[in-house]
Amino acid sequence: MAHARPSERPSGRAPLFLMASPRHFEVAYAINPWMRPDIWADDKAGHGRAAGAAFGALEEGLLAAGGEVRLVDGAAGLPDMVFTANAAVVLDGRALLARFRHPERRGEEAEFARLFEGFRREGLLSAVESLPEGLFQEGAGDCVWDEARQLFWGGYGPRSSLQSHRAVAGFFDREVVSLELATQRYYHLDVALSALPGGEVLYYPAAFAPAARHAIADRVPPDSLVAVGEPEAAAFGLNIVCVGRDLVMARTTPRLRAILAERGYAVREVDLDPFLLAGGAAFCLTLRLDRRSGDGERTPA
Ligand code: ARG
């Protein structure tokens, strides 16, 4: 099929992204190796202002690409709530709320539960549920929908538990391909893998256990599988928000920019440095609320 031009939505619907105000964002603790509370503490006001500007630029990038944004408040004392990708897994109007590994983020669960219950009441969602007790699952950050293959890639290890994948698969009635994340540095799947609408899967091999690399290669043909290097991964170049064939992401490397352009994507880069100090970038700061299975360029006939 011919590629849609950037900014053209084949379905005609604008993708809807949940974002949470960065007003309470700060780097106050370290629960992943990227987090730098020391740097933040040097100039809290300055970093706070920069974060506000970066967040605004991301929002503008999404709108310019043809997306819509639902902006909600953050909450005092929950600085990482700005990373809405971790709120839940959402597909077909159904949301499975996250359960966080670290106590620092657990307070977000009640906030997101309240917000999502509101979305259900207003008809944006039809079902909102919690994971069974004893499981961890950190939302879309560890559960990436691949619309070309109609499956979830599920990360586990540093944050989400392997056992959570069965619950995700059951709730959505979709396959979850479990991928073990081998390092603390690439602690969520969305910093190590990106599934693009044209069927390409971009990944950073060193982030994955050997069995996970095999699972990826088993499902993605070589011409669609793109391994990136450490410079791309470390610039959060896999943390990509797709708005059709427009890709909104942090400033990336010339190499990755060229790969994406060659595949027919329009890249919109945003300076997200203040959020990189917390270990997050574009995909982490958003959550698709309106994603339907069956949408996409390769809708089954
Ligand atoms: N500081 C946050 C954490 O460690 C960053 C989360 C980034 N989100 C993501 N989906 N990767 O949990």
Image (tube, rainbow, N blue to C red):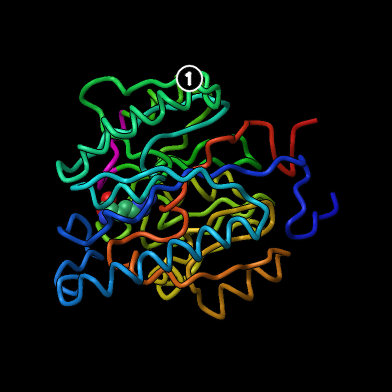
Confirm whether residue 182 shows in the render: no
- Give the answer, above or below, for where 244 lies relative to 295: below
- Image-quadrant location for residue 248: bottom right
In front: 138, or 226?
Answer: 138
Toward the right, the furthest residue is 2
Residue at position x 52%, y 23% from top?
122
Q: Position of residue 97 (x, y in %)?
A: 36, 29
Q: Does residue 142 show up magenta in the picture?
A: no
Q: Position of residue 107 (x, y in %)?
A: 20, 37
Mark 1 CB lies closer than 8 A to ligand 1: no
Confirm whether residue 118 shows in the render: yes
Toward the bottom, the furthest residue is 254
What segment is highlighted magenta in the picture? 157-163
What's under tag 1, amino acid-wise?
A: Arg
- Give the answer, above or below, for where 200 lies relative to 54: above
Residue at position x 63%, y 31% from top?
293
Secondary structure beneath dot 1 equals helix
Question: How many numbered marks appear?
Answer: 1
Q: Going by the image, does 243 lie left or right of 145?
A: right
The crowd level at tag 1 (other Cα within 10 Å; few <14, some 14-19, many 20+) is: few
- Give the answer, above or below, for where 59 lies relative to 288: below
Secondary structure of the magenta portion, mostly?
loop
Which residue bears the numbered disc 1?
121
Q: Position of residue 184 (x, y in %)?
A: 24, 57
- Image-quadrant location for residue 180: top left
Q: Going by the image, does 227 lie left or right of 107?
A: right
- Image-quadrant location for residue 4: bottom right
Residue at position x 21%, y 47% from top?
76
In front: 16, or 228?
Answer: 16
Q: Position of residue 73 (x, y in %)?
A: 36, 44
The C terminus is located in which quarter? top right
